[in-house]
Image (cartoon, rainbow, N blue to C red):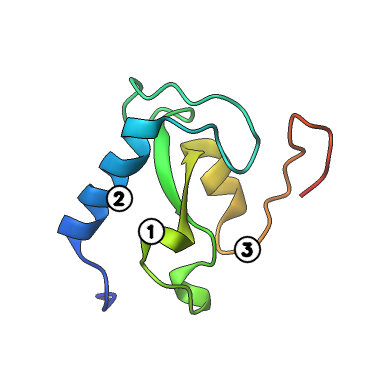
Amino acid sequence: MVQEGRSSALRKKHRAHFARSKPSCHICGGPIDYSLKWPDPMCFVVDHLVAIANGGSDQLSNKAASHNHCNSKKRARVYAPIIRRSGTLE
């Protein structure tokens, strides 16, 4: 099934945006090693805050950096079943 509204050029531009600023994982709060490559569980991936499947947009404002592992655990949910390093449950 082809998802409409998604552009590989836009995806590359958004990945580059996060790779330049190197933020922490928005799900667990831990640092991301941006040198790790897919499919390493701790590699950098871009997460849709509101999943495309749930009506979220493919815009930068709906994206955040995360670990591959954290993003996989979150799936299409709004919050992941992961305890942030700050000690709060999200």
Percent position (x, y) of residue 82?
72, 42
Q: Residues within 10 Å of mark 2 (few under 14, many from 20)?
A: some
Residue 71 in the image: x percent, y percent? Answer: 53, 46
> Position of 57 compared to 51: left or right?
left
Viewer-nearest residue: 23 or 87: 23
The answer to which of 20 and 2 lies nearer the viewer is 20
Tag 3: amino acid: Arg
Residue under label 1: 60
Q: Are marks 2 and 1 in contact (CB under 8 Å)?
A: yes
SS assignment at label 1: helix
Whichever of callouts 3 and 1 sits on the residue coming sooner in the sequence is: 1
Identity, as a three-letter code, of the amino acid under mark 1? Leu
Callout 2 amino acid = His
Image quarter for residue 50? bottom right
Q: Quadrant of residue 25?
A: top right
SS category of the residue bearing label 2: helix
11 vs 36, nearest the viewer: 11
Question: Which residue occupies 36% across, 22% down?
Answer: 36
Q: Which of the two marks, 3 or 2, is nearer to us in this view?
A: 2
Where residue 14 is drawn, which disc sits there? 2
In the displayed structure, would residue 48 be above or below residue 46? below
Say whether disc 2 or disc 1 marks the residue closer to the N-terminus: 2
Q: Write down the residue under mark 3.
A: 77
Q: Residues within 10 Å of mark 1 (few under 14, many from 20)?
A: some
Which quadrant of the figure contains the N terminus?
Answer: bottom left
Horizontal side, residue 83 vs residue 1: left or right: right
Q: Which numbered disc, 3 or 1, marks the residue closer to the eye?
A: 1
Q: Is 13 above or below relative to 41?
A: below
Residue at left offset 44%, top offset 61%: 61
N-term-proximal mark, 3 vs 2: 2
